[in-house]
Amino acid sequence: MALVNLYSDTQTRPTEAMRAAMAAAEVGDEQRREDPTVLVLEARVAELLGHEAAVFLPSGTMCNELAIRVHIRPGGDEILLGANTHPLRSEAGGPAVLSGAVMTVVGGADARFAPAELEAAIAAHPPGDRYAPRPRLVCVEQPTNLAGGRIWPEQQVRDVLDVARTHGLRTHLDGARLLNAVVASGTSAAAYASGFDTAWIDFTKGLGAPVGACLAGSRELVDEVWRYKQMLGGAMRQAGIIAAAGVYALDYHVERLADDHARAGRLAAGLAELGGVEMDPASVETNIVIFTVPDAAAFCAALEAEGVRMGALDARRVRAVTHLDVDDAGIGRALDAARAALAG
């Protein structure tokens, strides 16, 4: 029986139609700006996010790292960001190594901070304080990842941006799953992203592409990102083959994200009914379900034995993520396996 893989939405595989689009892609030398499919994808993402230009990159991590690099100055600049966000937890210390940045957590555990919390974090390091790092960049993760796929309300985003602008800070949107937030909330991608200096979306999560992400910003900033893209080995050749997957995903895999959200809600509701599970189904807003069990490692091992995969976040918390490779039957199997694991 096929594995029900809820470990992450990065586990999606390209559909046959996406593979066909990739095979048929028109290609050229991406480094020389001669790949027409890459150019189409970049133009679409720039328009989608409300920015002047965009650059196609191999991964979302590179989007974050190159954006941070163009915003941060050497000499102790500080990034203000939410708890357990991707640059802090999952990029191997890249902001410190590649940009010399200090990372400071703002707000509580759900990774969404209030404007007043940002104001307080900035005030803690006032201009001219030679003992402290210099606040320089504010990062928002929309929706959150390890905090459970929670959506920043549009007004909260705007208020945080207002605080950053008041203090002359740069702003960056980690939009790895931004289109999940768009579909779930009904707010446009541009409404969320256009106020940031840089913003990006990933194609390899719920959109189901095998490779790639696009970072958007002003033409000047994108030109500077290109310099670091070249420096760090991110420039490619006939990249239209993989860019075609992103174009296909934007055409056919955005609205269907609602199916993933519905299945995540069904999974959360079913898990909440099981003895030994602690979670609030109302906290599930997109495709990420995080819940607590007595022993996360043992629970996940028992699931794996039944052909269901989830991920242990720590000793007690488990994360499950729905995506286009998990159907209604897969959710049913996951709930049956969870029930058996807890009973055992």
Image: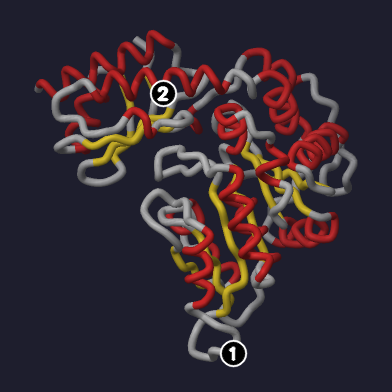
* Residue 216 higher or lower than 105, as above or below: above
- SS under mark 1: loop
* Residue 180 higher or lower than 174, as above or below: above
Quadrant of the image for the C terminus? top left
CB-based contact (under 8 Å), mark 2 and mark 1: no
Q: Residue at x 42, y 32 (%)?
A: 288
- SS under mark 2: helix
Which quadrant holds residue 219?
A: bottom right
| Nearest to viewer (mark 2 / mark 1) | 1
Residue 266 coordinates in the image, percent (x, y): 37, 18
Q: Residue at x 62, y 71 (%)?
A: 136
Task: Give the residue pinned by disc 2.
Answer: 264
| Badge number at residue 293 | none
- Near-viewer residue (97 or 238): 97
- Amino acid identity at mark 2: Ala
| Badge number at residue 128 | 1
Asked if residue 238 shows in the view, the reply is: no
